[in-house]
Amino acid sequence: MITVEKMLKIVEWTGLAVITLIFVFPFIWMMITALKSLPETVVFPPEWIPETWMWSNFKVAWSSGPFLRYFFNSLFVAVAILVLQILTMVPAAYAFSRYQFPGRGFLFGLTMAALMIPPQITFLPVFLQMSEWGFINSYIPLILPYAASAFGIFLLRQSFMQVPEELIEAARLDEASEWRIMWRIMVPMARPVLVTFGLFSFIYHWNDYFWPLVMTNSDAFRTLPIGIAMLKDAEGGIAWNIVMAGNMILVIPILIVFFVAQRQIIRAFVYSGVK
Amino acid sequence: MAAIELKDVSKRFGNQTVIRNLNLWVEDGSFTVLVGPSGCGKSTTLRMIAGLEQVSDGEIRMNGDPINHLPPGKRDVAMVFQNYALYPTMTVRENIEFGLKNKKVPKKERQQLIEEITAVVGLEAYLDRKPSTLSGGQRQRVALARAMVKKPKVFLMDEPLSNLDAKLRAQMRTELIELHKKLGTTFIYVTHDQVEAMSMGDKIVIMNEGEIQQATEPMEIYQQPANLFTALFIGTPPMNIIEKDKIPQLHSHNKDIVYVGFRPEKVVLSNEPLEGGLTLPAEIVNREILGHETIYQMEMSGIPFKVKHYDHPLEEGMRLFAYIAYKNLYFFDREGRRMEVEENKADLQTVAGGVRVCP
Ligand SMILES: Nc1ncnc2c1ncn2[C@@H]1O[C@H](COP(=O)(O)OP(=O)(O)OP(=O)(O)O)[C@@H](O)[C@H]1O
Ligand SMILES: [Mg+2]
């Protein structure tokens, strides 16, 4: 006999399965397309399973431009941004959460204002400034404008404010410098928040198309999303299978990062608040 | 080891004065207890000694040298917090080691110190555990170990036992007393619990509203309270205080006496008036049997007072005579200051049951 509870469970599971499918389908479609031959990508009705698995599409995509260079640029830019952001946001968040100083409210307000301004507004003045300084065609315009994250400072400040003052006082009595208190007491306690932020930041800059497009004009500093977008411009129409293979190359590192950090991320969402 | 001296210390938060001209001498090697009602400034005083709070006025000295300007880490003091304040992301070992690392103590020495200290507090088995996996009592020990390992000149403790259950609290109390004997270091201990204060301190500092009411040995506080506040603060139930005018049995020519006090446990209940003291005819209106003792709520023509006895409980509604020997009476003036009236005891005469009794 099927009890009401069992029925509810079945409904719940079906619901979850449908939602999962909705989210996962585009990804699966991308994967399948990346493995099709060119004619197969345009047949109607679409084929689910490619006749032959065209692993060579990846090779074609990869070798259609200096992809190793793009890949390295993307990695270097995203990691450099993240490192700088953490180096700036930890002291900033610590100061905003624990110090009384003149202008604190104003400065924090300014940080919050920065949070609300999208890059589409700032890119022009930044670009002009950077080109005036002669930095276009270097990593500097890709990295420097993102070296401090208003969002990160805000998030980390909230997390730091939950650390009991007594802990900091205990550390001061233990003769810890402010620098040690930040990195040995505060940062470990805010670890879930930092991991979450790090992921968001990394994914955002890894995938970012707009900013690198504006700030670079040579292959030496272009990043992966631009390289992949350029796959579309190949002569003789768009080769969707190649474009999708390129997209897979873009996405795979993120999936790897996600799997590695999975436990941390789940913890970050479940365990908010410091005990 | 060190003596601590507070000279004319004041503390203001904004325009609210929390500590007013405090003068305190903490003897080297003593177990000094700061006690008082909530909000009287005990923690603030302790935190000023620790350097976590700046003094607004006055000076704090250690062994005669001013330490006002020194940051907390340089004062050679260690503090145990009410909520322990253990670093939650570090293991027990790392918690204890943190201060030593900051002091740049070499690794070998650190290990030796940690072994030494953990043996004293019995934490050997827990060195690699995180504080969140420990019981309250174990956390308390980690906090103690973290303070002890630095070999400070002064230990500061802010209600360190208040988060423990009654049994564990009693046990830790004994352990702290023993620890103090073993280390011989100065302890300054904050509590609002008078039993803790009486049982642990060799000197008790009673505070109220940012001022010291009395600072002396436990027995002296009990026997010779300096004013109404200390008289009422120490002892359970507190001292009975009655306006002198309401006791017609008591005749005194001393016009300054406004209040008369006596401790509930110093009252003798009898069927007949006794001589040589104050005798009050009264009725038992209520009783509270606690097993080893009984507390009686008594009434003498509308004036309530309490009596504590260890004998077999007496019945409610009984009419008796409450007798208090002269030496157990305390006298206070209008401001609540205690008056020494030993020399004019002859002045004091009582009329009890219509019979004139001479002292
Ligand atoms: N940072 C602060 N800002 C403003 N007022 C404060 C601050 N710290 C303490 N006070 C005030 O100072 C007074 C004394 O506080 P304190 O913490 O020293 O009391 P306490 O004797 O330790 O009380 P308790 O037994 O409740 O811990 C209180 O009125 C409190 O409100
Ligand atoms: Mg307190």
Image (cartoon, rainbow, N blue to C red):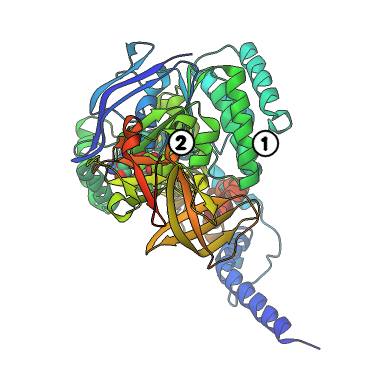
Q: Residues within 10 Å of mark 2 (few under 14, many from 20)?
A: some
Q: Whole-percent x and y of residue B221? A: 43, 33
A175 relative position to B133: left or right = left
Foreground pick, B312 / B19: B312
B62 relative position to A174: left or right = left
> Residue B222 — which label?
2
Q: Are marks 2 and 1 on the same chain?
A: yes
Q: Whole-percent x and y of residue A81? A: 41, 37
Give the chain of mark 1: B
Give the chain of mark 2: B
Query: Residue at the location (31% across, 33% down)?
Result: B344
> Residue B129 — which label?
1
| Kind of residue indicated by mark 1 | Arg
Q: Residues within 10 Å of mark 1 (few under 14, many from 20)?
A: some
Give the residue at the far front of this rendering.
B355
Is disc 1's CB within 8 Å of ligand 2? no
| Kind of residue indicated by mark 2 | Tyr
State which image quarter holds ligand 2.
top left
Foreground pick, B275 / A165: B275
Q: Whole-percent x and y of residue B335? A: 24, 41
Foreground pick, B138 / A249: B138
Q: Whole-percent x and y of residue B346? A: 34, 35
Name the element at disc 2: helix
